[in-house]
Image (cartoon, grey):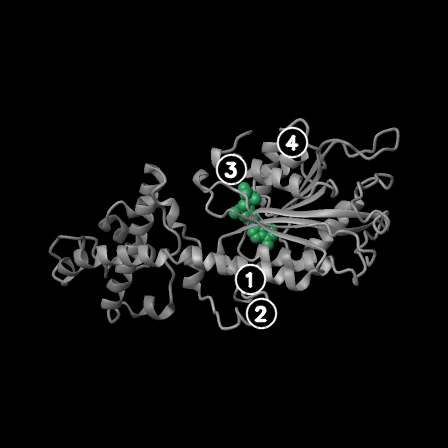
Amino acid sequence: MNGMSPKKSHEVHRLSTCIRDFIRECSPFVIDVGAGQGYLARELASPSIPSARPMHVLALDSDMDQIDGAKRRGGCSPGKREGCAHPDTDGSPCKCGSITYRNAFVSSDSLVQEIESWIASFPCDTQPHVGRTQSDHARTYPVIMTGLHACGSLTPTVLRSFVSLSDPDSAPPDSHSSGIQWKPSALALVGCCYNLMKESDFPMTCWDGFAPLKLTRQHLQLACQCPYQWTLSDASWRGSRLSRKKVVYRALLGRLLSQHAQAAPDVLLQGKKLGRLNSSAYASWSTFLQQTSSRLGLSDILDPDYHLGLEPGHGFPEEFPRLAPRLACLHAMRSLLGPVIESVIIADRIVYLVDHLRPNWNIHAVNVFDLASGSARNVALVVDQPIDDGQG
Ligand SMILES: C[S@@+](CC[C@H](N)C(=O)[O-])C[C@H]1O[C@@H](n2cnc3c(N)ncnc32)[C@H](O)[C@@H]1O
């Protein structure tokens, strides 16, 4: 598919198929949260499978660069809805899709506002395709919420919004200018980057089973690990070795700094952060030390010649070669816990949906991607339209 890596292409194909299979009877109106470069949004609006129904998609991302990139890839101009947005001349529902890119940070409030103004931009006589709850939704746009790798807090935010907006006791939000109403009708969400979650994002449910669990920053970092993939190919093995090396070098740096605590109290006391470094910084210990000491303002104190096996006169040569493999081993063993922690996070989200949605909603956790494709985060939370029980 257009401009995508094989992994991304696989993910977009599988998730868009999942949306169509599970959410067959829902509306063609879709919100793609954290749309990034807009790959999923474009596949939904303009499917590569000829028999698939095109959808109207609102692609939201908080990063302007992503939105600009998505527009360039999709050939769209700012704020404009691309594709046909008009009903057919015979008055039947619009059969072609469209895509609207917007730069917006998704919170529960902004999500409602963005959807409202988008829905309001459709011509009043555009009739939504209605689902099984036809009588109730005759004048209501059913809206599907989706996200591919909706990172960190974005997934919990959207789950909470979906639950509160789909509550039958809450009035459907309406678009002020047009009076058109809409309701979330389905959800298909794949989370990722658990390390970016906020403390309040876990547990989402009050279920006793999760109450004693507290996930620290270290747990959330581990949840991103997928040891199963380390040995899938030579490239993934090289990648996993590099990440272990990063962890080991950073741990050794921590030890080095603590040895220099007296000489460099400012760094330690002011809590300076090293931040992200390019992979090239890890080419060798001395390169790493050179870059980190200059970033931390410690060039006078940390000597880049402290590399493994040299004689710096600070006791490190004996200690580091012994410590490094042990740290690598410890990191590998800790990483085995990653999938367990991820499962706990996903289970909490499922229990939250089960607890808060009416029983007539269908809730699925779908293994949507093939792990061998390199897609570590592969569980989609899918919620589809309730069977109409006559209670709204
Ligand atoms: C991991 S990327 C996934 C991008 C795209 N869906 C894909 O799979 O290629 C996550 C995206 O979500 C966006 N994002 C994260 N939190 C967000 C928020 N609260 N509101 C809007 N966008 C957000 C980021 O800017 C980023 O582009």
| Mark 3 and mark 1 residues within 8 Å of each other at the beta carbon | no
Q: CA distance from mark 1 to mark 2?
A: 8 Å
Q: Quadrant of the N terminus?
A: top right
Ligand 1 within 8 angstroms of badge 3 C-beta: yes
Q: Nearer the viewer, residue 5 or 360?
A: 360
Q: Quadrant of the C terminus?
A: bottom right
Q: CA distance from mark 3 to mark 1?
A: 27 Å
Q: Amino acid at mark 1?
A: Asp
Q: Residues within 10 Å of mark 3 (few under 14, many from 20)?
A: some
Q: Look at discs 4 and 2 and give the one toward the viewer.
A: 2
Q: CA distance from mark 4 to mark 2?
A: 40 Å
Report the residue at 31% width, 51% height from top.
244
| Mark 1 and mark 2 residues within 8 Å of each other at the beta carbon | yes
Q: Nearer the viewer, residue 362 or 333?
A: 362
In the visual, does 52 lie left or right of 367?
Answer: right
**Location of mark 3 (residue):** 8
In the visual, does 108 lie left or right of 182?
Answer: left
Which sits earlier in the primary sequence, circle 4 or circle 1?
A: 4
Q: CA distance from mark 2 to mark 3?
A: 35 Å
Q: Residues within 10 Å of mark 1 (few under 14, many from 20)?
A: many
Q: Amino acid at mark 3?
A: Lys
**Location of mark 4 (residue):** 47
In the visual, does 54 lie left or right of 208?
Answer: right
Q: Amino acid at mark 2?
A: Trp
**How far across and down, in percent of the image, does residue 201 sit?**
55, 63
| Mark 4 and mark 3 residues within 8 Å of each other at the beta carbon | no
Q: Residues within 10 Å of mark 4 (few under 14, many from 20)?
A: some
**How far across and down, in percent of the image, does residue 371 sit?**
45, 42
Q: Look at discs 2 and 3 and give the one toward the viewer.
A: 2
Q: Amino acid at mark 4?
A: Pro
**How far across and down, in percent of the image, does residue 96 sit?**
74, 31
**Location of mark 1 (residue):** 348
